[in-house]
Amino acid sequence: MSSARPRIHRRTALTAVPAALLAAALTACSGGGASGSAAQEGGDGKAPATSISVNLQGKAAAPGEPVKVTLAEGKLKTVSVTAGEGGALAGKISADGRSWISERVAAPGTAYRVEAKDADGGSDTATFSTAEAEKVNKLSLAPGKNTTVGIAQPLSVVFDHPVKNKAAVEKALKVSTSNDTEGSWGWLQDYSGKDRVDWRPKEYWKPGTKVTLAAELNGIDTGADGGWFVRDYLTTFTIGAAQVVKVDLDGHRLSLHRDGQQVFQAPMSGGTPGGDKASWRGTAVLMSKEGTINMRSETVGLGDAYDKMVDYSMRLTWSGMYAHAAPWNSGYFGNANRSSGCLGMSDANAAALYGQVRVGDPFEITGADAKGTVAEGNGYGAWNVSWADWQTKSALK
């Protein structure tokens, strides 16, 4: 091919010929004295047109598939696929230079523009759009963004709709930590009945660890009755001091330990043993510090046993177990469990504990006076499952 011959470029929309490889053309040098047009159409047989095909075409292409660009002849140099709102799909050119495939899938209801260049300088552009999602799935994340939490706080994701394609969703949930913490996702049913997946480390977090979750879910189909994700999510948080609250139901006392040293203790009264009013045992994680709240027995299935305004309320389970001030029960502090399931203390001791604990701190509850162990979905009960068993709950194991 003579370097003196001019290079000719032709642009053709990929959607113009939806069923053929000639969905778009990358131009080649003309040769043999023939005109550029005749050479590209193979008029003299010496310089047939170089062409590409794209697997997604038209105005209602199926979402959830990677974008693939294939070159008929020559080698691709660059390919870019940009979304209508300015986002881009990263991808890689194959070793032989003949194709390019995106790392992520095309999202629903999105217009895309493809720009490709070959090694000889030819270029072309194309556009396509994906069909809108008939149903959209969403999620809620814990802990909150840019928060500092305790050493037992898991990453917890609760979905609005059922997730059948758990493996595809889990692959899109990318956790990174500042110190390469070992951990695993585990699927469970939230106390609300919704699908949920938690990421917990093998052991309690190390203080100071910085954690990031990049949920690259845009374009993921969650399966029948679940719908599509149409956006990504990002959250970051930091692990605070190493604090553990140890609760001895049989000894009727609790204590706060920081960095392995006891810094606070108090007599208390747990739930009345022998029935539904007993407390839970196992590791419960402080979910929220709710201050003064109205507690009514009807909300936890205990009839009309109580309706009180309660101070220094620290939620430990979704089922209604709290640590809180309970001055009406003072006669039992330190000697008997006679509450309706919560861990009650004096006003002064509840205030002191409330001021020191942090969301995500573990409450390690032991003793025979209990009605069972905190379940995984009843708050954050993943610590009551062995590490080996927790790993089996991953959809990727």
Image (cartoon, rainbow, N blue to C red):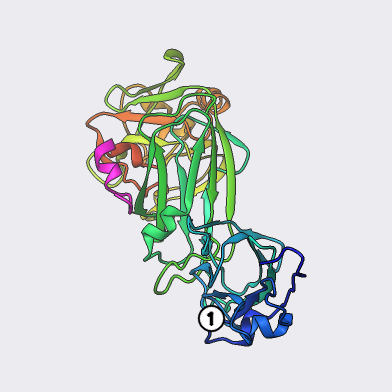
For residue 231, what is the image quadrant? Answer: bottom right
Q: Residues within 10 Å of mark 1 (few under 14, many from 20)?
A: some
Mark 1 residue type? Leu
Q: Is residue 85 above or below residue 233?
A: below
Q: In this orientation, which residue lies closer to the viewer: 119 or 107?
A: 119
- Residue 390 painted magenta: yes
Q: Position of residue 373 (x, y in %)?
A: 27, 40
Residue at image location 36% in from the left, 37% down from the top: 339
Q: Is residue 181 above or below residue 138?
A: above
Q: Please, what secondary structure does the residue beneath circle 1 have?
A: loop
Q: Is residue 98 above or below residue 156?
A: below
Residue at image location 43% in from the left, 27% down from the top: 330
Q: In this orientation, which residue lies closer to the viewer: 27 or 309?
A: 27
The reply to whether residue 236 is in sight is yes
Q: Furthest-top residue in view?
A: 261
Residue at image location 43% in from the left, 33% down from the top: 152
The reply to whether residue 320 is in sight is no
Q: Position of residue 192 (x, y in %)?
A: 41, 58
Q: Which residue is mark 1?
A: 21
Residue at image location 70% in from the left, 69% down from the top: 84
Q: Position of residue 95 (x, y in %)?
A: 48, 55
Q: Which residues are magenta?
A: 386-397
- Residue 22 painted magenta: no
Q: Position of residue 262 (x, y in %)?
A: 43, 13
Q: In this orientation, which residue lies closer to the viewer: 331 or 134?
A: 134
Q: In this orientation, which residue lies closer to the viewer: 232 or 351?
A: 232
For residue 183, what is the image quadrant? Answer: top left
For residue 391, what is the image quadrant? Answer: top left
Quarter occupied by the N terminus: bottom right
